[in-house]
Image (cartoon, helix red, strand yellow):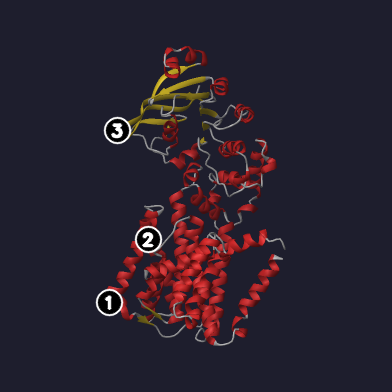
């Protein structure tokens, strides 16, 4: 049954550009996918490691800016991807070393500060980042002959990356290392007493999260062909965290659902509702009140309790 | 006889409060040692110092003649120190099997592996099941800890410590909060631990604990005030003074 549902979901996802209609909606679907990768990355920390980061847009932006800088200096797409991910991994390691000096609220505040530093650099260091005007790139890559210039091509490429991210998360969650990460969230003192290196486990979880955040940032750059300080604001970090919390932390489907909710509200509902931000806020409040565990675990709970089951 | 645990002149203070002042303790290999003392005597602090959860201000700790004073807490577990907590510290959302598996995993290099499935590590899972069966918890293997009784959780605490095959086991009030029947079960379990494991136990329940221990150490205001056999400690005027106020 589970496999059948998975196969059906794959077919639906793979055929989205064929039945969704206009290219506008294909682009929305692409956005959902790369924001879902971002949310999955944030979920590694917020969900599985119990470390709430409000600075991940900083890493997201570092990947996008690094890729844009490498590309505008005349390098090929392979160098762009490798360089951007290397820079993001290094930045994630630095973020982790600094942020892991605190736990709980201390950790949150350090990540806010780190995110704001990145925003400050993006906004003020004009010779490096072009300031408020941002950096524009030209052209998307064509891996294995598939041009990403068209919305359909970009969607399918993003879908492949998204599926890789989901698969890697599924493997991570079921692995001994995944169990170690969850253990440090639930009982760090006990984990230490059991022989685990709690700091190192959290550090590696942060770096893993940074890697997939970098991948999402790279896709964001290729999608928009432009990056500006808007991508690294505190609001962007909070939005990613809301995707995770609204969908359900420490689940695979939760962050994906949350990403879909936020992207649809931002892009589709905003076309019909002037005060869409208010509606989005109201939805979050409703989720917190009626399904505090998030949409996916909340719906699963309702289904379990349903008399029709 | 080999000394399993040697604590020398151990001191610890929190601000102006001296919690442990010049504690000396020598536990021989295979010994069953009981540590008693009124609330605030510094018993749990002594355990936390031995396991490295808090660093001492002065003094030294040796495990089987090896100085471990500056060894990080997690490394001490790898060297053979196991412990249970006075306040039960388990993973409530996880099953009993997963709790014990996590304990076994703590000493295995596999804990760093992000690529294999934990539930397919047959030898690890089998070992965890064996440990649970030895402690009479086989029927509850797949039940989340949150759905078990307090007494069962106490046994899981001990199961997790024993799963790591410690050379020195520190039991912090293993009978706390248990019914009389549960106390007997846990005592049977503790007395059944083989002699290659040295046991140091903190306990308030004298009826149960005095029968178990070969030697007893009485702590008071962070100092060892009496040490000896059961008869010696019970007859000692300082013990009577501390417990009865004579």
Q: Secondary structure at mark 1?
A: helix
* Residue A118 position within the rendered picture, expressed as x and y whole percent measured from the top left: 33, 68
Q: Secondary structure at mark 2?
A: helix
Q: Quadrant of residue B165?
A: top right
Examine the rendered structure and indicate whether residue B65 appears above or below residue A179.
above
- Please report, as a chain letter, where disc 3 is located: B
User: Which residue: 46% across, 68% down?
Assistant: A240
The answer to whether residue A302 of the structure is visible from this angle is yes
Q: Which residue is mark 1?
A: A126
Badge 2 and badge 3 in a common chain: no
- Please report, as a chain letter, where disc 1 is located: A
Q: Report the quarter where the C terminus of chain B lies.
A: top left
Q: Is residue B59 left or right of residue B182?
A: left
- Please report, as a chain letter, where disc 2 is located: A
Q: Quadrant of residue A307?
A: bottom right
The answer to whether residue B193 of the structure is visible from this angle is no
Calculate the distance from the C-alpha at mark 1 to the C-alpha at mark 3: 54 Å
Q: Which residue is mark 2?
A: A111
Q: Which residue is mark 3?
A: B16
> How many dots with numbers?
3
Which dot, 1 or 2, sits closer to the camera?
2
């Amino acid at each position: 049954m589970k496999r059948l549902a998975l196969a059906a979901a794959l077919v639906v996802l793979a055929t989205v550009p064929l039945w969704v209609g206009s290219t506008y909606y294909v682009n929305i679907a692409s956005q959902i996918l790369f924001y879902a990768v971002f949310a999955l990355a944030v979920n590694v920390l917020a969900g599985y490691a119990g470390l709430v980061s409000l600075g991940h847009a900083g890493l997201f932006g570092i990947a996008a800016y690094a890729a844009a800088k490498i590309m505008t200096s005349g390098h090929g797409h392979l160098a762009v991807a490798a360089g951007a991910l290397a820079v993001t991994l290094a930045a994630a390691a630095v973020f982790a070393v600094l942020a892991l000096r605190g736990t709980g609220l201390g950790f949150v505040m350090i990540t806010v500060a780190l995110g704001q530093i990145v925003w400050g650099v993006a906004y003020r260091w004009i010779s490096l980042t072009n300031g408020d005007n941002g950096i524009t790139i030209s052209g998307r890559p064509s891996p294995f002959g598939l041009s990403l210039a068209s919305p359909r091509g970009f969607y399918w490429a993003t879908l492949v990356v998204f599926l890789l991210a989901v698969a890697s998360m599924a493997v991570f969650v079921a692995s001994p290392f995944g169990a170690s990460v969850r253990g440090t969230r639930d009982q760090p003192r006990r984990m230490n007493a059991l022989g685990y290196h709690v700091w190192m486990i959290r550090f590696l979880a942060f770096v893993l999260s940074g890697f997939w955040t970098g991948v999402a940032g790279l896709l964001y750059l290729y999608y928009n062909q432009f990056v500006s300080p808007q991508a690294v604001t505190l609001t962007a970090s909070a939005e990613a965290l809301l995707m995770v919390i609204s969908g359900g932390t420490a689940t695979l489907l939760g962050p994906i659902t949350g990403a879909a909710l936020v992207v649809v509200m931002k892009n589709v509902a905003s076309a019909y509702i002037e005060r869409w931000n208010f509606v989005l806020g109201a939805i979050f409040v409703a989720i917190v009140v009626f399904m505090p565990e998030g949409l996916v675990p909340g719906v699963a709970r309702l289904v379990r309790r349903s008399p029709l089951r | 006889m080999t000394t399993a645990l040697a604590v020398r002149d151990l001191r610890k203070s929190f601000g102006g409060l001296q919690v442990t002042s010049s504690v000396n303790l020598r536990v021989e290999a295979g010994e069953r040692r009981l540590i008693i003392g009124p609330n605030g005597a510094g018993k749990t602090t002594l355990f936390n110092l031995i396991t490295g959860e808090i660093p001492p201000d002065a003094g030294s700790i040796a495990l089987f003649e090896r100085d471990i004073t500056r060894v990080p807490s997690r490394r001490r577990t790898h060297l053979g120190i196991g412990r249970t907590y006075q306040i039960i510290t388990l993973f409530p959302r996880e099953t009993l099997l997963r709790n014990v598996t996590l304990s076994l995993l703590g000493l295995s290099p596999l804990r760093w592996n992000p690529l294999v499935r934990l539930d397919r590590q047959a030898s690890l899972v089998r070992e965890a099941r064996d440990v649970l069966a030895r402690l009479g918890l086989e029927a509850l293997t797949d039940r989340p800890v949150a759905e078990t009784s307090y007494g069962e959780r106490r046994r899981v605490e001990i199961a997790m410590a024993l799963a790591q095959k410690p050379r020195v086991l520190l039991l912090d009030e293993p009978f706390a909060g248990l019914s009389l029947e549960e106390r007997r079960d846990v005592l049977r379990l503790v007395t059944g631990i083989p002699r290659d494991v040295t046991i140091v136990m903190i306990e308030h329940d004298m009826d149960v604990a005095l029968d178990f221990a070969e030697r007893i150490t009485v702590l008071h205001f962070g100092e060892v005030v009496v040490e000896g056999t059961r008869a010696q400690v019970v007859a000692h005027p300082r013990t009577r003074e501390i417990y009865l106020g004579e």
